[in-house]
Image: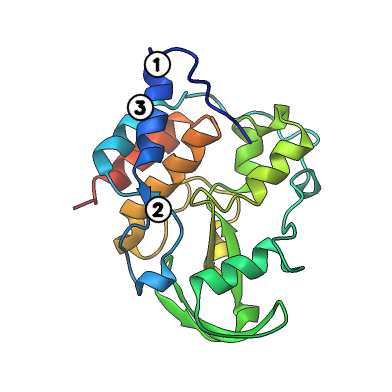
Amino acid sequence: MPSLSLESTVLSPRIASILLSLALISGCSGPGSPSQTTSKGPANSGSTKVSLQSLRIADPRPMKDYTRDRFAHWNKAGSNCDVRDTVLERDGKNINKTGCNITGGEWFSVYDGQTLTDPLKVDIDHMVPLANAWRSGADVWDDKKRSAFANDLERPQLRAVSASSNRSKGDQDPSQWKPPSKDFWCQYAQEWIAVKSFWELTVTKDEKAALTEMLGTCS
């Protein structure tokens, strides 16, 4: 996991903006009940805009040597449960399970407004897809750091959504794919920026323009 050094009382503008964004991380309001939108995300659009401006713009890096296996995910998360189980339980309500196996419940997919009751129709989306992270700088990380990114429960990186919306999104950034539900654009942009800021990933010019557009929907 990346760490921020506070050896000096004078912080660079980039580090200061990241700290400000992280300090304001909380559960944003959005479609669905509070229990269905519990991924942590920045609540202040002003601080998010500052964080967006601090992100470095760069062309996508090559996909050479990329595989999802370089981002080992669904790590164990206590009592033999894994991260996927944890997110399914966190983002759902009326959860039924056998041991760690989620057998039923209800999930509201904020991307497309679907309410799902079959866990087999629920995917755990990586807010910043693994392949996008690779193109944004994760290609130079070691596999331990990539795994920490893929299992990040502290930032708004993991969310239970409909399988159809997750697969429609694929590895695309906001200039290529936005949630069908425009009501979620504000929070989607905030969460994308929070993840990229913390992990110090780059954005493309088109990606930054799309995020700016989406932040324009924040009330």
Q: Position of residue 175 (x, y in %)?
A: 44, 43
Position of residue 215 in the picture relative to residue 194 (left or right):
left
| Callout 2: SS | helix
State which tag comes first along the sequence, 2 or 1. Answer: 1
The residue that label 3 is drawn on is 53
Q: Position of residue 207 (x, y in %)?
A: 44, 37
Q: Does 157 sit above or below residue 163?
A: above
Q: Position of residue 125 (x, y in %)?
A: 57, 60
The residue that label 1 is drawn on is 11
The residue that label 2 is drawn on is 188
Q: Is residue 166 visible?
A: yes
Q: CA distance from mark 2 to mark 1?
A: 28 Å
Please name whichever residue, 95 or 30, is drawn nearer the observer in this view of the structure: 95
Q: Do callouts 3 and 2 mark residues in contact (Cβ within 8 Å)?
A: no
The residue at 64%/44% (across/down) is 149
State which tag comes first along the sequence, 3 or 1. Answer: 1
Q: Amino acid at mark 3?
A: Gln
Please name whichever residue, 15 or 129, is drawn nearer the observer in this view of the structure: 15
Q: Amino acid at mark 1?
A: Leu
| Callout 1: SS | loop
Q: CA distance from mark 3 to mark 1?
A: 16 Å
